[in-house]
Amino acid sequence: MAASPRMRNALTLFSAPDCVVCHRVRLVLAAKGVSYELVPVDPAKPPEDLLDLNPYHSVPTLVDRDLVLYSASVVSEYLDERYPHPPLMPVDPLSRARLRLAMLQIEKNWVPQVQAIQSGNKVQAEAGRKALRELLLGSLPLFKAAKFFLNPEMSLADCAMAPIIYRLPSLGVVLPKEAKLIEDYGMRIFRNPGFARSLTPEERQLRDLPA
């Protein structure tokens, strides 16, 4: 956490235009119906404000007046507590712990494959596609277990997972017919007006969504 070099009156999110972890935070904000100022960031050329605010110069970075937060997991949990309605985590400690573990696995195992496909060389990208496909197929029982990811209601885990599922066509990850329930899961979220609000213009181009 760092102090902001200048006071901001509005909630401000520094976010890359097409970034799976930034999208995660924007989806939380959309689910909460929270208004905020979006500052587009080219990660290769972060703006001076971001350099001053965040010692890692990373996105997403959230500024709430004199509070500065970074890391998608930290920002997401803060937003869920700061804006408690609708809640995006279950009440009981066991279910919360289970979802936190799932989100950690998404961060450590899934997101690096997406980034390898988007930013790696040809060999890295192909390895990322193979690994992401295997992760998805290995998780089929989890998608079958509940309407949303490990939970009967939409949660922070869905905010982490849905941006990955949304990008599968653009990432070149093709799933077999028996994995259709993963696409069905995604469409339950993509049809929500809040999901459309979470998208940047660049992300809207990644796939055609039904009106």
Image: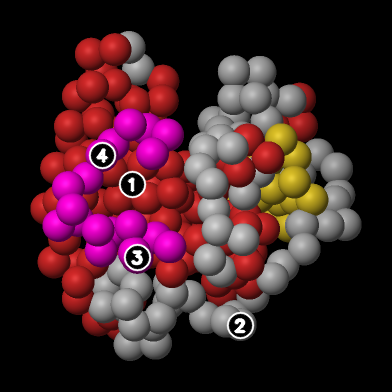
Is residue 196 placed above or below 79 in the rendered structure?
above
Of badges 1 and 4, the one in the foreground is 4
Q: Mark 2 highlights which residue?
A: 85
Highlighted magenta segment, given as a residue range? 169-187
Q: Mark 1 highlights which residue?
A: 107
**Could you tell me if residue 71 is visible in this image?**
no
Magenta segment main secondary structure = helix
| Between discs 1 and 4, the one toward the N terminus | 1
Magenta span contains residue 177: yes
Q: Residue at x 56, y 69 (%)?
A: 192
| Between discs 4 and 2, the one toward the N terminus | 2
Of badges 4 and 2, the one in the foreground is 4
Q: Mark 4 highlights which residue?
A: 174
Please name the amino acid that badge 1 sits on.
Glu
Pointer 2 and pointer 3: residues touching (CB < 8 Å)?
no
Please name the amino acid that badge 3 sits on.
Tyr
Estimate the spatial distance between the alpha carbons at disc 3 and disc 4, rounded to whole Å.
Answer: 16 Å
Is residue 104 placed above or below 172 in the rendered structure?
below
Pointer 4 and pointer 2: residues touching (CB < 8 Å)?
no
Circle 1 — which element?
helix
Q: Quadrant of residue 156?
A: bottom left
| Mark 2 neighbour class, 10 Å CA radius: few under 14, some 14 to 19, many 20 or more | few
